[in-house]
Amino acid sequence: MAPTTRDEGTSGAVLTLPNLLSFLRLLGVPLFLWLVLGPEEDAWALLVLALSGITDFLDGWLARKLDQTSTLGQVLDPVADRLYILAVVVGLGLRDIVPWWLALSLPLRDLLLWGLVPLLRTRGYSALPVHFVGKAATFNLLYAFPLLLLGDGDGTVAELAQPFGWALALWGIGLYWWAGILYAWQVRKLLATTERRHARSSGA
């Protein structure tokens, strides 16, 4: 997938309804961590994750419906996804719901990819388009961790949630790393086929 400059139809607007929803979604990240690690109110934490999923759908749908797709919105959406994933794995790791190898494997991949950003900037880009595999990985993970949190309880629902949660988590981790490998390969191809430049603008 080739890198692009700013997508057609995007704007530099900040105060839009989709962006407002994205900001509200970001505010839910520290709230989730406090609920999980402080009072351990798992039901409320699950509600925060559910609302995050709803707003994630709504901000994209409204951006297209109202023709309010913006450069800022294209940055906020994946940032919010990654912050939620990071918050959930840290919270579940500290609660001993998931092992630390799992909790560390996701931010480690992101850390490695962030190391590629300076290389992209030598070609005038700050990011590459999100790959379908990456979207599939995020989808799996954002459903897996609420199920694992639910599976930490007692009763039939918890017993059913745990295996489904682990299945989605393992698939999600595999896809997350595969998407990272594809991204690194794209960067390698870009470096090999594009001359060094410093004055090219790029939408995130």
Image (cartoon, rainbow, N blue to C red):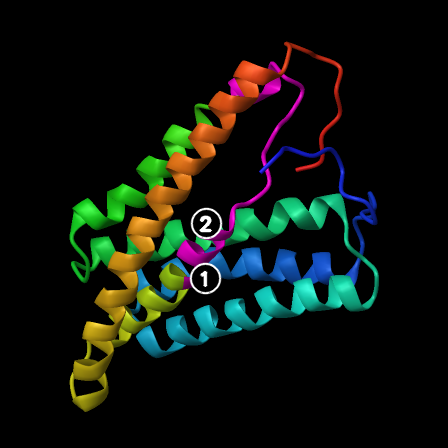
Residue 59 to residue 100: above or below: below
Q: Which mark is residue 31?
A: 1
Q: Is residue 38 visible?
A: no
Residue linked to disc 2: 134
Label 2 – label 1 distance at C-alpha? 26 Å
The residue most toward the bottom is 156
Residue 194: x %, y % from top left: 62, 16
The residue segment tinted magenta is 118-139
Q: CB of mark 2 within 8 Å of CB of mark 1?
A: no
Is 150 rendered above or below residue 169? below
Please identify the quadrant where the C terminus is shown: top right
Amino acid carrying label 2: it is Gly
On screen, residue 79 versus residue 75, left or right, reads left
Q: Earlier in the sequence, mark 2 or mark 1?
A: 1
Find residue 72 and report its image quarter: top right
Asked if residue 131 is among those painted magenta in the image, a careful observer would answer yes
In the image shown, does 123 or 190 lie closer to the viewer?
Answer: 190
Left or right, 19 with respect to 1, comes to right
Q: For the point 51% across and 52% down, which residue is it?
A: 132
Q: Amino acid at mark 1?
A: Leu
User: In terms of image quadrants, where is residue 141?
Assistant: bottom left
Does the magenta portion include 50? no
Give left or right: position of 200 versus 129. Answer: right
Viewer-side label of 2, 1: 2
Q: Under tag 2, what secondary structure?
A: helix
Identify the residue at image location x=52%, y=73%: 51
- Tell me, yes or no, if residue 91 can be seen here: yes
